[in-house]
Image (spheres, rainbow, N blue to C red):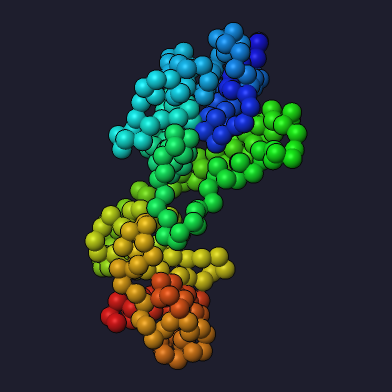
Amino acid sequence: MAKKKLITHNGKFHTDDVFACATLCLLLESHKESYEIIRTRDEEIVRGGNYVFDVGGVNDPKADKFDHHQTGGAGKRENGLEYASFGLVWMKYGEELCGSKKVADYIDKKMIASIDAQDNGVDVFATTYPNILPYAIWDAFGSYLPTWREDESAMDSIFLEVVALAKKILQREITRAQAKVEAEALVEKVYAESPDKRLIVLDVYYPWRDVLMKYPEPLFVVTPRVGGKWDLQTVQVSNNSFKSRKDLPASWGGLSNEDLQKITGVPDAIFCHRSLFLAGASSKEGILKLAELALNN
């Protein structure tokens, strides 16, 4: 069978066309179809592509054409952020790759929307310190671009190298999102069955923040960690804040081992972070005692 042709623009690459390409590569690989990646602006070659993205001036998902540079763009999300090529490809094929719409939507919210926004010239980050910006995925990919001192003739091979990296990142994000969505249902069950909803005890570590922050009661969460030890964590007021709904007792801050054991009366207490959001003990019994003390503090 003839190889499927994945067409995008030549020259400098950007994060959205890198990830759009990675998405299509994973899709075709899942179908065991062979493909070739062609970077060009030649209109005749573009017209002959099986999948055309970030070039061509047409957004027609039924024809597998995914560009957003044409007049009027290619549509917006419900929150107003415009789609770029990554988001357009994902809108058609994300659910198939992820196995569920919920997982695909989670990944769009977590990474794709911000990548699309950046490609469309929209700043979605609010900075705290002047002239200090977050180091984002587009900065990492941009580091692969040749400097003015370097030869740009290898741009196509560099693009393939970065696409290979993007495929690995996207595969991990899908795996993590699938596990997270599965865990959410389990956390919901534990919350519903908890007699005191201020304290949620998880016998398996599940990603819990998005679930428990929806509810007003949870203050602390107990989870196991590697090595058989246990953690007591505070619940933050929101995902965008380090402020806890209730801190651990101030007198515990920065203490460890004998010092923490003496002040708490818990013989296997290990440590308490000086910022009062995390404490540890060697046993479940010990961590539950610390949780009781924290609740009653």
Q: Residue furthest bottom?
A: 262
Q: Is residue 145 above or below residue 198?
A: above
- Is 108 on the left or on the right of 47, as rendered? left
Residue 231 seen in the figure = yes
Relative to 125, residue 256 above or below: below
Measuring from the top left, give residue 107's x and y in whole percent.
Answer: 44, 40
Which of the 4 image quadrants contains residue 87? top left
Q: Position of residue 70 (x, y in %)?
A: 43, 20
Residue 248 at x, y percent in the picture: 36, 77
The residue positioned 51% from the left and 43% from the top of the image is 173
Is residue 215 positioned above or below 68 on the image?
below
Residue drawn at 49 percent across, 79 percent down: 271
The residue nearer to you, when weighing 275 against 43, is 43
For the C terminus, give its image quadrant.
Answer: bottom left
Q: Residue at x 46, y 39 (%)?
A: 118
* Residue 122 placement, left or right of 191: right
